[in-house]
């Protein structure tokens, strides 16, 4: 995750919200909410850092611990999606072999 994530996510979020208005798929809305939560998370963390954007080395290591630990909102969302997919696959495999 980049220190510039909030700025990079702005245009895609606008398009995703417009698409959601057309589709109204609830899981799509949850994805948008998670991206927005991640934007807020990065902004709050970024407000607390002592380095400037010109300090490339510090910017590169921004949120490394959070990324490694999987403690960002989007990392947690990703884990839950993957866990649900694995559960569905296990159930599906059990039905096809039974």
Image (tube, rainbow, N blue to C red):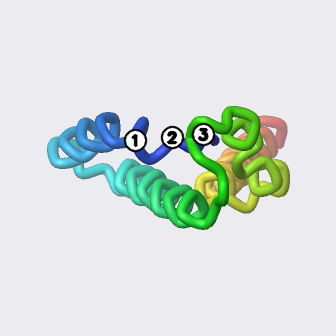
The kind of secondary structure element at disc 2 is: loop
Q: Which mark is residue 7?
A: 1
* Residue 67 on image: x %, y %: 76, 49
21 vs 26: above or below: above
| Residue located at (57% from left, 57% from top) | 46
Q: Residue at x 60, y 39 (%)?
A: 2
**What residue is shown at x 39% (from left), y 52% (from top)?**
32
Q: Contact (CB < 8 A) between labels 1 and 2?
A: yes
57 lies left or right of 26: right
The dot on residue 2 is: 3
Q: Is residue 88 visible?
A: no
Give the number of the disc on residue 15: none
Residue under the point 24% across and 42% down: 14
Within-10-Å neighbours for mark 2: few <14, some 14–19, many 20+:
some
Q: Mark 2 and 3 residues: CB-CB less than 8 Å, in contact?
A: yes
* Cα–Cα span, label 3 and label 1: 10 Å
Dividing the picture into quadrants, the one containing residue 66 is bottom right
Name the one closer to the observer, 54 or 74. Answer: 54
Answer whether residue 73 is visible to the viewer in this image. yes
**Residue 45, x across and y down, in percent:** 60, 62
| Label 3 crowd (10 A; few <14 / some 14-19 / many >=20) | some
Give the Cα distance between marks 2 and 3: 5 Å
Q: From the viewer's side, name the closer residue of 43 and 29.
A: 43
Q: Is label 1 in a helix, a strand or a loop? A: helix
Which quadrant holds residue 69? bottom right
Q: Which residue is mark 2?
A: 4
**Few, some or many C-alpha atoms within 10 Å of disc 1 (few <14, some 14-19, many ≥20)?**
few
Q: How many marks?
A: 3
């Amino acid at each position: 995750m980049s220190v510039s994530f909030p700025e990079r996510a702005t245009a895609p979020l606008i398009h995703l919200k417009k698409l959601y208005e057309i589709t109204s798929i609830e899981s799509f809305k949850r994805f948008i909410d998670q991206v927005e939560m991640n934007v807020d998370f990065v902004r709050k963390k970024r407000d607390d850092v002592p380095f400037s954007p010109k300090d490339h080395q510090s910017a590169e290591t921004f949120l490394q611990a959070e990324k490694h630990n999987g403690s960002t909102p989007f990392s947690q969302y990703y884990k839950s999606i993957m866990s649900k997919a694995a559960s569905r696959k296990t159930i599906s495999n059990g039905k096809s072999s039974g």
